[in-house]
Image (cartoon, helix red, strand yellow):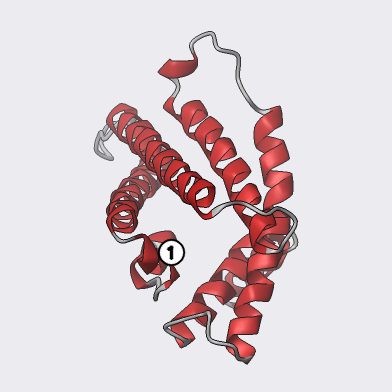
Amino acid sequence: MGPLPARASLDNLVAFLNTTAGRDHATRLLQYLCKAAVADVSVDGPVARLYAATSIARHILRIPKSVDLWNKLPSWHGFLSDFQQCSSTVLLLFYAADHVLWADLIGLLSLSKSFRSRIYTVQHVLWMCKLFFGLAHFSKELCETPSNGILHVSFVEYQKRREMRQIQRRAILRNCLDILIVLHFVKYPKDIQRLPSRTMVASMI
């Protein structure tokens, strides 16, 4: 009976990697590893070329996610009361701006330097709003998740609540770290091309 959990975990991993989200996570990890290998990805070389290839792959994988977010846009009735819906909508706008910048990067568009800078600023603002909405959503969920001890509920229910609260705490911590990262990039925009150690740590929490 010992090997079953490991086999089940491997099967779950393979199933996840066969999804669009799984491929995006895998290419993101490879992208971060490439960026960690060289301080400046603009330097020509095999690692830099691999980084560029993974960047293109991630943008392609994001297209279905953008369409899915568009299909899930809620009605305006009670919209602002749901922080998660607000976060998803802002993320959709962020992806739209990101696709414009990517099209300029590969030569499909020709944007002026000032216009490109404005889009970067809009991206930072949108990402900051997404993080704040996410922080509010998970904080609200954490407050609403019961924290009663095992004496008040069954052991299975207690474990579910405990796991849920751990997920919510990790999400809150990740959003706080990402907010600090975005604030740093707003002040030092050129650092976005540097080693993403803090970004990598935040994304893996």
- Say if 9 sits above or below 176 in the image: below
Secondary structure under tag 1 reads helix
Residue 21 rendering spot, x and y as whole percentages:
65, 55
Q: Position of residue 86 (x, y in %)?
A: 48, 27
Q: Residue at left 72%, top 38%? A: 67
Query: Which residue is the site of mark 1?
Result: 204
Query: Which residue: 49% across, 16% down?
Result: 79
Outermost residue toward the top in this view: 77
Residue 169: where, in percent of width, then height? Answer: 31, 47
Q: Amino acid at mark 1?
A: Met
The crowd level at tag 1 (other Cα within 10 Å; few <14, some 14-19, many 20+) is few
On screen, 115 above or below 54? above
Quadrant housing the C terminus: bottom left
At a point 48% along the width and 11% down the height, the residue shown is 78
**Depth check, front residue: 132 or 38:** 38
65 sits to left or right of 201: right
Is 164 or 118 nearer to us in this picture?
Answer: 118
Which of the 4 image quarters holds residue 146? Answer: top left
Horizontally, residue 191 falls left or right of residue 149, namely: right
Q: Number of callouts in the render?
A: 1
